[in-house]
Amino acid sequence: MTPKSASMLERFTVMLPAILWLIWMAVFVWLLDGGRYRAFLQPKFWPLPVVGLAVVTLFLIAFRLRPPSQDLRWRRWVAISLLIVPAIYVYTTYGQSLGANALAGRSTGSADIFSLEELRKEGSAPAYDPDRPVLLSTLAMNPEVFVGKTITVKGGVYRDQNVPASYFLMFRFYIFCCAADAIPVWIVVESPESSRLETETWVEVTGRFSLEMINNNKVPLLVADALEEIEPPPPELRYLYF
Amino acid sequence: LIGCFIFQPLSYFRDPNIMPESPSGSLHRPALPPGSRHMRPPAGNRHADLGILAQAVFVGVLLVLLVFCRRTPSFQTLSITFVSIVLEAFPFILIGTLLGGVIEVFVPRERIAAVLPAGKRRSIFLAAALGLIFPVCECAIVPVVRRLLQKGLPLGAAIAFLLGGPIVNPLVALSTVVAYNFDWTVMLERLFLGYLVAVCVGVIFERWFGKDNSLLVGINRSDDQGQSDGNSAETAATPLWIRIRLAVIHAADDFIDIGRFLVIGAFIAALLQTVVPRHVFAALADTPNLSILAMMGMAVTLNLCSEADAFVAAAFRVLLPASAQMAFMVLGPMLDIKLVAMTLGVFRKRAVAVLAGLTFITVFAAIILKGLLIR
């Protein structure tokens, strides 16, 4: 290495923390712009990226050039690279959402959907309105309100060899704090069009809702009268939130 | 102001008061409180070098995975989970490091000694409940505990605060009450068991370890020959704005030191969340003790925020006994992969292993004991 390039490397190493703070400032601003953070976090948690932005800005303001000793130089490179990697992941992951793979991994059976009944607030049962789509989370919390009624629901499609050809699972993820704690909420849809649907496509289904006993499990079932494939919502609107 | 701090020419380089970091990480700055040392392992330490090498390899693996596996469904699940954990935890760690920086610069040892009860045991009992007035989640607590240890907080009390703080606090109480449909007994049970475990582990850890054999080199201030801790007359004479800036600089250094462990822990947690299906844990529901162990295993692998885990535990109400749900809620904020990774920035590996094992066993014992007593 020539003395000139060594000096450049030295100066760059000294600047590394400032580069880290700048990158994370950019990430937090980008996440806050248009509510992108909702693709990962609960909307009520908007203060988190704001706080993150404020603190890293403070770090940048207080930043002072300090040349690391020869021994510490590569340690600093590794430490800061480790902290930059998640920023790259944030940018490349945005646009994706939890899908069929996560459904298969996180589902615990029909308990998924009925566990949300416990979160129902006393005296806050939703009114049935045939003209308004029902959120899967509302359905999960208040299934008895909609039993025997015709409703419209939107969600992603999940099909595999265990599901008979005329059925599919319609699912979304319900987030408490962040996508890491998301639990799947799903219903079974019966439709002659099921076999042509591919997993992960989004559909809007109108049909009659009921609770059926299948293999000794209570299962929410929607018998479709109409089914339409729709464009998936933008990533920040795909989840349901607590 | 920003320009003044950021765009100062490389004059800082030439400032005779600011010398390069020494191999041990210390900054020799006569004008600044000597406590402002970087807490890195000493250079030449072969294990530390191997650790750094492993971290470098880890960075490479993460980037290679991103390039070659980006489009696979399981990697998408993994990366969403990883990013979510990091985005949720980073702000809390940033706040924690900031609090740590403030403690470092503005709170003298004497003040901490004056606040704590005389006996070490009594300080453990107090520290386990500190979260009630100083609510800190499990991500923010590590940098705070690190600074408190440097300020002379007894080891047992630090452990009790580290374990109890993220459970015995009003935010966790509130989220538990909401998740369990305003069943106050669940919340009270959770807080009480959290306190009990924190105290027990704090007392036992204090008996087994001292600061000398449990803390990383540089964290234990008792080996600071000739160093004061930020309360010297020299420091007191430092202008307030310089001290504020110093606190922020300490915080930034701490974040770089501890944040990287969070990244490693979050990735491993996301990986486990992706490859281990949850129904594996649910399958153990029929055997009560096994279901407790299974939920404890899940708490360690899921790495959920202590404010969110009650909702996930509640989702298992239909499947699992209450004791298993409680085990999940008590252990989760005390022991998970990202926490273990972060504590490696404070404690020696052996101490971290003992702390993790001890916490796991104590939680299991507490849950079993509670079951026997209630029966």
Image (cartoon, rainbow, N blue to C red):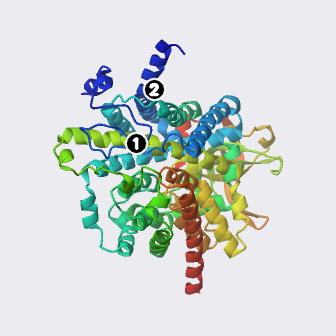
Q: Which residue is drawn at 41% across and 27% down?
A: A14
Element type at mark 1: loop
Within 10 Å of the Cα at label 2, are there few (<14), some (14-19), or many (20+) other Cα atoms? many
B18 relative to B150, above or below: above
Relative to the observer, which residue lies in front, B164 or A125?
A: B164
Residue at 47 percent of width and 74 percent of height: B196
Which of the pair B201/A219 is nearer the observer? Answer: B201
Disc 2 and disc 1: Cα gap in Å? 16 Å
As drawn, which residue projects farthest toward the front? B225
Q: In this view, does B97 lie to the left or right of B374?
A: left
Looking at the image, can residue B74 be seen?
yes
Parent chain of label 1: B
Give the numbered dot on residue A13: 2
The residue shown at (49%, 49%) is: B345
Mark on residue B38? Answer: 1
Name the kind of residue labelled 2 in the image. Thr
Q: Could you tell me which residue is drawn at 58 percent across and 34 percent down?
A: A93
Hey, which quadrant is residue B36 in on the image? top left
